[in-house]
Structures are given as C-alpha cells and as structure tokens.
Amino acid sequence: MPITAPSLEESTTADVCIVGAGIAGLTAAYLLQRSGVSVVVLDRGPIGGGETAQTTAHLASAMDEGFEQLIRLFGHEGAQLAYESHASAIDTIEAITRGEGIECEFARVDGYLFLGAGQAPDLLDRELEAATRLGFPGVERLERAPLAAFDTGPCLRFPQQGMFHPLRYLAGLVAAVLRDGGRVFEGTPVTHVDGGESPTVWTRDGLHVRAKAVIVATNTPINDRFAIHTKQAPYRSYAVALPVPELGVPRGLYWDTEDPYHYARLHRVQREDGGFTEMVIVGGEDHKTGEADDAEERYARLEAWARARFPVSGEMIARWSGQVMEPVDGLGFIGADPGHSKNVYIATGDSGQGMTHGTIAGMLLSDLISGRENPWTSLYNPRRRTLRAVGEYARENLKVARHYAEWLGRAPLSTPDDIPRGGGSVVQRGIHKVAVYRDEEGSLHEVSAVCSHLGGVVHWNSEEKSWDCPCHGSRFSPTGEVLQGPAFEPLEEVREPGAGDEDQEPEAPEELQRKAS
C-alpha cells in the first residue's frame, strides 16, 4: 500500500515541524495533532520510505540488549523503565490500531529466546532471573521453543510481544494526522535546522517552516555534526523471506543469543486467488556499515539458518537489508538536541528495536513539547553518559579513527577500467579519492569519495547500489545524491586537479584535525 503526499511548495508555519516521516516522526505527529498541536511533517523521500520500510517489524519488550546487561548499565530502576517503556510502546500501537481501525495485522504473540550453538544454558537462567526481578509478568523457561522441525533446546518464553505490518500502520497514522488538520509532505529534503525561540527548518528549494519546536526523526540526526555521532554506530542488517506451510509454524517471534543474533517471525500475505502465503522472515548477519560488501554470502547464511530450523517449502520470496544505529549503551537517544539548539528535539539510536523505540520517541517527545512530565526523560536523554559503556564507546570510536586513517592511504584502484557495469569503486587520482560508478550502459559517473558530513571515505555497497560512509552512516546514490543522513549535502563533483597536485600532501578532514588538536 503506497503512501503518497505532495511536496512542500511554499513556506509555512506550524506549532511543531517534524523532519522524518517514519514511525518516530509520524507517531509524534499523531499524538501532538490529537492533543491540538498543529504539525507539519517533511520527508526527503516517500512517506515511510526510510528504515521503517526495511524493518522485520518485531514489537518486543524483551530487550535486544538483554535485561542482565541493562541492569549492569543502568541499574535496576533504569532497566525497569526500559522494559516498561517498550511494553508501553506495544500497548500504544495496539490502542492506536484499534482506536483508528487500522488494518495492519497487529497481533499479540509469544517471543522465544533460545541459545546459539555451543552456548551455556546458564545464560538463559541469568536472563530469566533479571527479567523476573524487573517485573516482566509471565516470562518462563521452557525445554524447547514450539518448532517441530528443530529442537532449540531450552528457551525463555516472553508473553505479550507483538507484530504488525509497519507500512499499513503508517498509512493509518498519516490518514489520522491529515484528518486532524496536520500536514504531511514528501519529496522535500531538509538542508538546515535553526534552533531558537522560533526554530526554522529550511528545505533544498529555499523554502522554510517556522515553528515553536522542531523534531528531527531522521534515523540519525542531520542537524548536528558531532554531539550524537560519537555515541552510536551504523550497522547493516539483512533479512530474507521464505515460504512455509500454512499453519505449519506457531505464530510468534523467535530469537537466538548468537552475536550477531538471528531474529525470525511469521508473516502471512493474501494471494489474488483469496488464499494465503505463509512465510518466515529471518534477519541477522549484521556488520558495521561500509566494512563488508558480501551481501550474497550473508543472504545465503540466513537462508541456511532458516532452512535448518523451519519447514521451508520453496524458494526464497524476498530479501533486503536495512541500517540500524547502535548506541553504545543499547538504548535510544530521545529528547532535547544535545548540540544545545533551543526547541529542537531528536530521536535516534533504534538499536534494532526501531518500531518500539520509534513509538517511545513519539510518546516522549510529544510529552516534552507539551510540557508534560514523562518518567522516561532521563533514561533516554541524548546528553547522557553511561560510564559502564565506556569500553564500547572507545571500541566504536577506534573503528571510526581507523577509517579516517584510510583517508590518508591510497585507494585500491588507480583506474576505473576494471569497474563492471552496475558497479562502483573508489579510485585514486593524484591526491584525490574519486567514487566512480559505471552505469548499465557503460557510462562513468564520478564524484568525490569524501563524505560531505565529516570527511570519511565512502565505500561501494554493491547490493544496495550506494556509497556508504562507515564513520557515521551517511549513504549516497551511485551519482552522489544523499539517500540517508547525517549528511544533507551530496558528494562533491570531481574537480580537475591543478598542476602539482600529484606532489601535494592531502589535508586531513575536519574531524581528524579536531581530534589531533
């Protein structure tokens, strides 16, 4: 079900301007508009066309980070608030679905967590004890998950989890926002956000929206250069859909404890003949964005994992990948802009639980803007520093530093001759690194390989046909247009090198200079 909206054609005003029309932005828009606060929503692409469209749509209060780990990082009270917020997000999706009559296949199901290969059963025992301490009702240890085709061994059952069709849910939110007087625009790239007493959002076409508050819900913020990007890292995750016999697998959510972990759920699609095709959707095989270009192998491993555990009855139906932002401490960053832009708010750091984190963001931000107290404010504060996560912080930023060091080395190719049709590679040309794409007709397209956000060197993603920056997750089309922030400017056009360029030392990018000083 495509969701369509017009592009912004003239400057306007609203109480709140929301940048990003995924689940976080549209949930905030729905809740604000329902409370009488006028909203304008802007999105670079189609509505729901970002990472919300790539989700496998698990609605889980069984936390991705694990309850034992959350207690270590945030203490008992913080971990309990994390559980309660995700449970409340599922409740809110259910309430909106029923109240608005949204046909998005929402269902309550059990979730099953089982061990990865060779892992000790006491891992599950510790997680059960932690979940019980936090007040998770009904969680229990079973001898195996209810999969006839595969003996998982011991597992934990988490009741009252959920699943739905995310784009149908977004379509319902958009319809409700428009009904209540809100305005939603697609095809409207935002290039700048000014905070202050009357914050202003500027678009690529020179138009603006003035508001009393701005929410930046763009998966990762486009409005600051440094404040949040050292505290989270972009990861690519993969998914496949495979057919299974109708009613051949109990409907539920299934996760293992491997690193990266696998996650699976059942999904049903109605056919033109009135029947249904049942499929299992399996995700995993995550890697840091830009650090691998082996999607075929990762899809194959996911398919093999699924066939070993589910009664797969045919060939693969679909496959896709998406990008998640992994915060160093496992919880999203939701609240006032940490860059100190007054009356600007952000939502980021989905950590693989984007549907619940996005809903939490809509709930929390609508409360903050409306002046209502919310018990989750401190937990998700973007300015927080989780001391017990300092090791993960250091590891992720060391990876970023290594990628900046790559900027000073030489690219793998010195000529584009070996680039196949439909392929791309970074080419060394004097002191310059050039991102070269050869289209299907054989023509070459050349842009700078230096990311327009903070100067990282982009890598070619052959599966998505995109240039991906491994430093902070910006993604660009084959010809350099922005697909995903934090960058909002395209890759620069290649300029002809001047005389003597071959012998010049390249300048370090801005962030490398800053770190060096």
Image: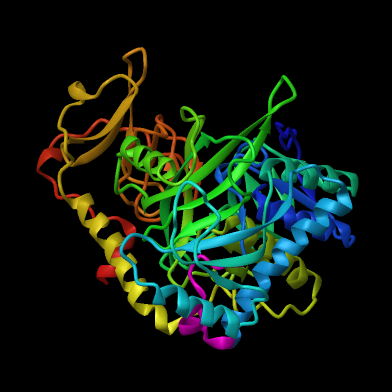
Q: As rendered, which of 116 and 185 lies closer to the eye? A: 116
Magenta: main secondary structure:
helix
| Residue projecting furthest to the left | 503
Residue 324, how many percent across, how many down?
48, 54
Position above or below: 100 against 516? above
Q: Which residues are magenta?
A: 61-76
Identified at 42% across, 55% down, the residue is: 234
Question: Residue at 58% across / 73% down in the picture?
Answer: 140
The reply to whether residue 339 is visible in this rendering is no
Q: Let me know if residue 407 is in the magenta part.
A: no
User: Could you say which quadrant of the image residue 441 lies in?
Assistant: top left
Q: Is residue 2 above or below residue 130?
A: above
Figure quadrant of the N terminus: top right
Find out whether residue 71 is within the magenta segment: yes
View extreme (top): residue? 441
Q: How is the image coloured?
A: rainbow
User: Taking the image as drawn, is residue 265 in sight?
Assistant: yes
Residue 124 falls left or right of residue 111: left
Residue 104 is left or right of residue 387, and the answer is right
Above-or-below relation of 380 to 243: below
